[in-house]
Amino acid sequence: MKEIKLDLGNSSYSVFIGSLGELNFAGKVAVVTNPKVAGLHFKTLLSKIKAPEVYAISVPDGEEYKNLSNVESILEQCFISRLDRKSTIISFGGGVISDMAGFAASIYERGIGYVGVPTTLLAAVDASVGGKTGVNNKFGKNLIGSFYQPSAVYIDTSFLATLDSREIAAGMAEAIKMAVMFDEGFFNELAKKSLSYDEIIAKCVSLKADVVSQDEKEAGLRAVLNYGHTFAHVIECEGGYSTHLHGEAVAIGMVMANTLACELGLLSADEAQKIKNALEAYNLPTSYKIKDTNAFYEAFFHDKKSMDGNIKFILTNGKIGSHIIKGDISKDIVIKVLSKFC
Ligand SMILES: NC(=O)c1ccc[n+]([C@@H]2O[C@H](COP(=O)([O-])OP(=O)(O)OC[C@H]3O[C@@H](n4cnc5c(N)ncnc54)[C@H](O)[C@@H]3O)[C@@H](O)[C@H]2O)c1
Ligand SMILES: [Zn+2]
């Protein structure tokens, strides 16, 4: 069992990677999950939980259900089960479940215990760590939420065995994102496909732990984790959130960000190609047809990160393994880059 600590003062906690052992709780436990994950793995999780009472709370499966009304349904079921301040909510699923369960835990009676057990690669490498919780609404993705750290995260890669290949690839996109931004050696290993899931997850969690420990509330450095995401959010939105998985859109978004970086002299064509090759090695999409560059550009402003009218692009800073946040790129240059995808 590998333990990675997040150093966040009073909210410090550990992420454990390895075979899930007994999970002991003094108070009641509610496991938030969905029918798919529950059908595949609930019995296994249940056999590990030792608590006075354990409840299962199920929400429908899918990003379209990541909304306030399902958080309210989670809260109602918590009240029906009479959870109290000594109780714990366990999120058991992918990022959709951890975002909602974490949010519910943060507001139920002003905050109760919260533990993460991610079951997708994307949630293991990214969503389950760092304390961002929340839901979508008609104005956009993740616009309602809180920063609420779990008290522990348990990652057991045996749960990942039932994921389909598209979901695995989507998780790899986030891993490649972290490597390109922070660690050239890790990138090279990923490109060679020489690492196990346990090794990939451990590396990503350490990198994210490091970033979140320095900048929990995204005043600066944490924004670097949004590399590729400014473009990805537009791609996801244009496809009605159904044509591309989040990680797939991020893969294309990174290729677009790299094209912009090349244009600005912040990445060589050679290194951009290396990143593209790595994405393709994991069967991630790297091409996209932009129909209207102006509409695509305007859509950047719907992202909450650019609501002040200033789009911040996260780019490599000269080479793989380095990053820079650029807020001063002219519209002309961005449109020129977007036209390369028409
Ligand atoms: N809070 C954060 O820091 C953060 C970071 C990245 C992404 N996110 C959020 O995470 C979400 C995406 O997460 P995701 O990619 O895990 O999607 P997801 O939660 O929708 O899971 C993807 C699919 O896999 C299924 N699934 C889950 N575990 C499974 C298993 N073990 N076997 C088979 N199927 C399984 C799910 O039921 C779902 O159908 C987005 O809403 C995104 O906004 C949050
Ligand atoms: Zn992401």
Image: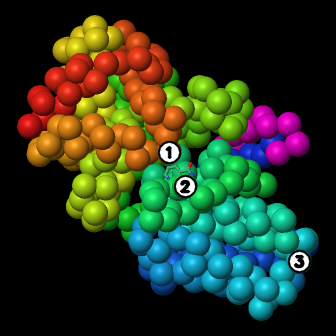
Relative to 48, 63 lies left or right = left
Task: Please give left or right for residue 213 compared with residue 172 in the image.
Answer: right
Residue identifier under label 3: 84
**Which disc number belongs to residue 304?**
1
Residue that appears at 36% across and 53% down: 246
Front position among marks 3 and 1: 1
- Is residue 104 among what the camera can see? yes
Decide which of tag 2 and tag 3 comes sooner along the chain: 3
Query: At 40% from the left edge and 27% from the top edge, which residue is drawn?
Result: 313
Q: Is residue 3 above or below residue 166?
A: above
Q: From what the image shows, is residue 271 above or below residue 177?
A: above
Q: Is residue 34 left or right of residue 169?
A: right
Which one is nearer the viewer's eye here, 14 or 101? 101
Which portion, as a residue range, is magenta?
Answer: 1-11
Which percent across, then down, holds residue 122?
Answer: 46, 52
Q: Position of residue 201 (x, y in %)?
A: 52, 43
Identity of the residue drawn at 73% across and 71% down: 89
The residue type indicated by label 1 comes to Lys
Residue 277 seen in the current view = no
The span from disc 3 to disc 1 (Cα, nearest Å) is 34 Å
Residue 206 drawn above or below residue 110: above
- Mark 3 and mark 1 lie on one chain; the one further toward the N terminus is 3
Q: Callout 3: few (<14), some (14-19), or many (20+) C-alpha neighbours within 10 Å?
A: some
Q: Is residue 89 left or right of residue 281?
A: right
- SS of the residue at dot 1? helix
Residue assigned mark 2: 143
Viewer-side residue, 78 vs 164: 78
Residue kind at label 2, given as amino acid type: Leu
Task: Return the x and y of residue 197 as percentages of the image width and height.
Answer: 45, 47
